[in-house]
Amino acid sequence: MNLRSKYGIPQDAVITIAGTVGVGKSTMTNALANALGFRTSFEKVDTNPYLDKFYADFERWSFHLQIYFLAERFKEQKRIFEYGGGFIQDRSIYEDTGIFAKMHFEKGTMSMVDYDTYTSLFDAMVMTPYFPHPDLLIYLEGSLDDILDRIKERGRPMEQQTPVSYWEEMHQRYEEWINNFSACPVLRLNINDYDVVQNEQSIEPILERISHFIQQSQLLKR
């Protein structure tokens, strides 16, 4: 018996992984996909035509970047459900508006007109009964110190040069966002409670919790 059948997780389930930079979204995405025999969906960064321009001029390109992300994530979400589910998704469509676009607006790098246009478009596309929301959003959380240790450990040059104050702000914004999130069921996992790299068996208690959350949400829909 495979692990998906063992824990009664539907073969067409769609599970999204969310959390701040360095929290281990990609690692969890791969671990769950391997355990369940699901496909993965990762963010496409290399083909983004706005990313370099955005880093050179936040104020000019923030709106363009967020619209691009919204379009790409919407198309990917549609593709996943048309395929029939069975996916683990790295990063959710909801984080763009709830964290990043909001941050640009509050910091003055996106105008009120652009922010209103963006959020109106997001609501019309995503926050409707017709949009295929995931069966479960897994939020990976940890203390700021734990996350800073992970960022330091993986050693990406751009992240090493980023001021700690930025990571502090992102950590706070993510916590505020998830505390008010209600678009789909949420399972919160503390990064200190498992180690899917060193101990593959630590994925099984997570699968048990995933199964419980999905079953409970299906009961509520009836």
Image: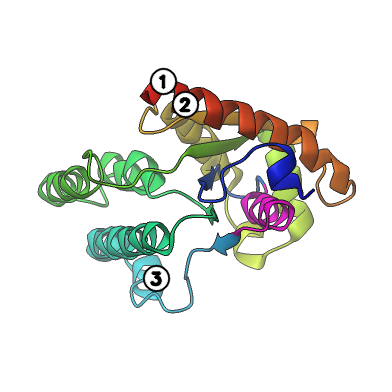
- Label 1 and label 3: CA atoms lie apart by 41 Å
Residue wearing tag 2:
217
Front-most of 114 and 88?
88
Residue wearing tag 1:
220
Give me the residue at 57% from left, 50% from top: 11
Residue 126 picture location, percent across and down? 25, 46
In the picture provided, is 17 more to the left or to the right than 100?
Answer: right
| Residue span colored magenta | 24-38
**Secondary structure found at label 3:** helix
Quadrant of the drawing holding the C terminus: top left
Front-most of 217 and 151?
217
CB of mark 1 within 8 Å of CB of mark 2? Answer: yes
Indicate whether 73 appears above or below 217: below
Give the dominant element type of the magenta stretch: helix, strand or loop: helix
Indicate whether 24 appears above or below 53: above
> Image quadrant of residue 81?
bottom left
Give me the residue at 89% from left, 46% from top: 199
State the scheme by which the image is colored: rainbow
Residue 221 picture location, percent across and down? 37, 25
Residue 49 picture location, percent across and down? 34, 78
Q: Amino acid at mark 1?
A: Leu
Label 3: how many Cα within 10 Å (few below 14, some 14–19, many 20+): some
Q: Is residue 175 visible?
A: yes
> Image quadrant of residue 80?
bottom left
Label 2: how many Cα within 10 Å (few below 14, some 14–19, many 20+): some
In the picture provided, is 184 more to the left or to the right than 193?
Answer: left
Residue wearing tag 3:
51
Indicate whether 52 appears above or below 70: below
Q: Is residue 186 magenta?
A: no
Q: Amino acid at mark 3?
A: Leu
Give me the residue at 52% from left, 23% from top: 216
Q: Amino acid at mark 2?
A: Ser
